[in-house]
Image: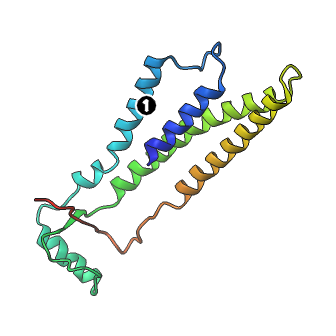
Amino acid sequence: MIASIAALFIYRHQVIVGDDHWLKFRKRNLILIVGFNYIVYSNMLTPLLLTSPIDQIAAKIEILKHLPCPTKNLLSPEVYVVYENIILFLLYTCVLIVFVGAECGLLSLHAAWILFFSTLRANFSRRTRMLQIQFLFALALQVNIRIKTNSSLPFRLPSQQHFVMPLLDMV
């Protein structure tokens, strides 16, 4: 989801920026940027897997000490405890949010700058100006969605030191 939001910002920026601008990416550079984003975003769960406990039963019993009434059958083999320590995951998530925020913020600010100042020119038709104003409002909505998504990330309480993930059909 995060990669698709970043790709939307990149594509919207490419549509708005003129062909002669230095920030207009060529096709090869655009593929490299989108590919790099997908590689970065697809590795988001890597810190969880690197810190998973070796003894799953002991980790599940430790969870039962903190959460006496879990909602699922915690001791079943379909439940996998992903990590014991949240610090590495929080650090990686914060770096990722700063990376996404800087990338999407720069592109959206530049696109908004172009849209705002291009509507002030008199050499465009009224229909073109109205279309650019609609693009500007769509860009503002898209930025608002990204801000709402990043500000509502679910963080666990410090007392819940473990993260439990049900396995999806491991057969």
Residue occupying the far right of the picture? 122
Q: 147 and 52: which one is in front?
A: 147
Q: 94 and 30: which one is in front?
A: 30
Which x, y percent locates residue 44?
Answer: 35, 47
Residue sitting at 74 percent across and 31 percent down?
A: 115
The quarter of the displayed image where residue 118 is located: top right
Position above or below: 79 against 140:
below
Residue occupying the far bottom of the picture? 69
Which x, y percent locates residue 5?
Answer: 50, 44
- Asked which secondary structure carries label 1, the reply is helix
Residue sitting at 80 percent across and 36 percent down?
A: 130
Residue occupying the far top of the picture? 20
Which x, y percent locates residue 136?
Answer: 72, 39
Q: How is the image coloured?
A: rainbow
Q: Which part of the image, by quadrant, shows the C terminus?
A: bottom left
Q: Which residue is mark 1?
A: 34
Count of picture labels: 1
Position above or below: 141 against 56:
above
Residue type marked 1: Val
Residue sitting at 56 percent across and 37 percent down?
A: 9
Q: Is residue 168 left or right of residue 88?
A: left
Residue sitting at 49 percent across and 36 percent down?
A: 7
Q: Is residue 109 left or right of residue 95?
A: right
Q: Is residue 45 left or right of residue 74?
A: right
Position above or below: 20 against 41:
above
Which x, y percent locates residue 72?
Answer: 25, 79
10 Å crowding of disc 1: few (<14), some (14-19), many (20+): some
